[in-house]
Image: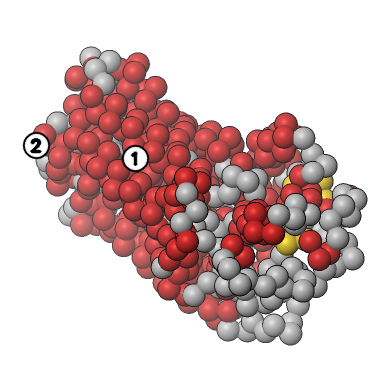
Amino acid sequence: MREGFRDSFFGQQLRRVRRFRFLSYPEEQKGFKLPQKNQLETPAVLTISIGDHELSDVPPATPDEFLVDWNGPNDQDNPRNWSLVKKSSVTTSIMILTITVYIGSAIWTPGIEAGAEFFGVSTTASSLGISMFVVGYGIGPLFLCGITEIPFIGRTNPYIFSLAIFFILNILTAIVNNFAGFLVLRFLAGFWGSPALATGGASLDDMFVPHKVAYAMGLWELSAEAAPALAPIVASFAVQYEGWRWAFWEMSIMSGVCLSGLCIWLPETSPDTILLRRAQGLRLATGDHRYRSHSEVVQASMSTREIFTESLVRPLSMTFTEPIIIAINMYVGIIYAILYSFFESYPLVFQKGYGWSISKASLPFAALLLGSFFGGIVYWTWNWRTIDKPFSKAAPPAIPETRLPLSKYGAFCFPICILWFAWSSNRTHWIVPTLSGIPFTIGATLIFNPFLTYLPYAYPKYAASALASNDFFRSMLGAGMPVVAHPMFAKLGIAWGNTLLGLLTVLLIPIP
């Protein structure tokens, strides 16, 4: 627990102010003996890279005995050697952070009509409150997630700083009185909340070995899928009885509590950042400035401008230059857009069609939560049988593509769900269209988890950038859907509007 607090954001700030003994690292304590060698096996050519710069391209300015690395295969500072309890705690923290931010995407759903009346705009214009948030958290990772691969920044600092700004923006949104300001605040909230949505997977990859990461990734994706479906349920009762502003007061409360907890509990997971801090500690303890981490050696040949340029440009360039990423982004983006069409069609079906209240009409979204849970069980079982159980340290590492086969089964769930919903809504008992949501999120789980687990292993050096690229593309498609869906359903109706979307998913089946 002491190490966890020491490595948290708050612990690191205390260390900057004063060197408290109980927050010291082993190399800063009296009696610490330097290991004979700071690395296990120093390869002839190192392959750590930042941008296009590889360590093999850098002159060996630091002798092996001063190159700081892990102190043996069981070094407890290595995130992959942390206890299961600590890994579970960090995973849970990232899930809570993801839910806190992701709920913000659809929190406006129950307030669209009340907001339209308050601001004096159309319902379609009011739905931009969803779209602008989604645009923000699609663009945000391009600027905020690549920098988490820079060792002196790490993963935790962007989480904390961005969440603090997110918290303030939600308070401002709750008190805003003009529509233009409302939309700007929604965009900024999405932008500053975005690191959790793209970098969370990279943080999990820091802690778990390849044959185990799918379990943590599945839980994280479950939180990401559940949050938008949970949002209307969370907000609808407050909106119905207290007004639309209370949707954002709820967001402020949730983000404030989450920020307080993460500041004192979430440790750094980036191996490069941890080794950089170790090298800094050794320099401080010994007075010998020859101690340097791998990342410092790499960055010695790069300017600060080059470091930031590589980190900021890479996610966008991968979006348009990597064929696999383009295919995955296209498929996930369309499924994501269809998910956001539900935030328009569900109120039309259950509130207007079945005559339910705002709060009651949000309850069918619970079927989406149930489907995510069932899909997670299928995914974890499949991972155990095909990847985890056959794993052997003596065998060569499994290729990234071994994670993809399950996705081809998930592809068939979407047309079933959408056509089911299209032709049962307002024609049958309300339970029939409600249950159609279950196969949708089963399919989403069987698509998102394999794809988003595949990306970090297909692009191991740039996991955060690959995930940021996916987040950007799917968010752009998802952002357009609330604006398009309302007039589409008004003109074509629920049945034919959803039939159009269902047939589109049939055309996409060959991609997985």
Tag 2, which secondary structure?
helix
Can you give x and y, in whole percent of width and height, for residue 215 in the image? 49, 70
Circle 1: element type = helix
Give the left or right position of residue 81, taking residue 255 as reference: right
Q: Residue at x 75, y 52 (%)?
A: 289
Give the crowd class for mark 1: few <14, some 14-19, many >=20 residues within 10 Å: many
Residue at point 47%, 45% (across, down): 17
Q: Quadrant of residue 244?
A: top left
Q: Is residue 310 above or below residue 21?
A: above
Q: Residue 241 shows which numbered tag? A: 2
The alpha-carbon separation of the residues under discs 2 and 1 comes to 19 Å
Q: For residue 52, say whether it is visible.
A: no
Label 2 environment density (alpha carbons within 10 Å; few <14, some 14–19, many ≥20): few
Q: Which residue is mark 1?
A: 104
Along the line of sight, the residue nearer the viewer: 484 or 57: 57
Q: Position of residue 305 (x, y in %)?
A: 72, 31
Quick check: 76 left or right of 46? left
Q: Amino acid at mark 1?
A: Gly
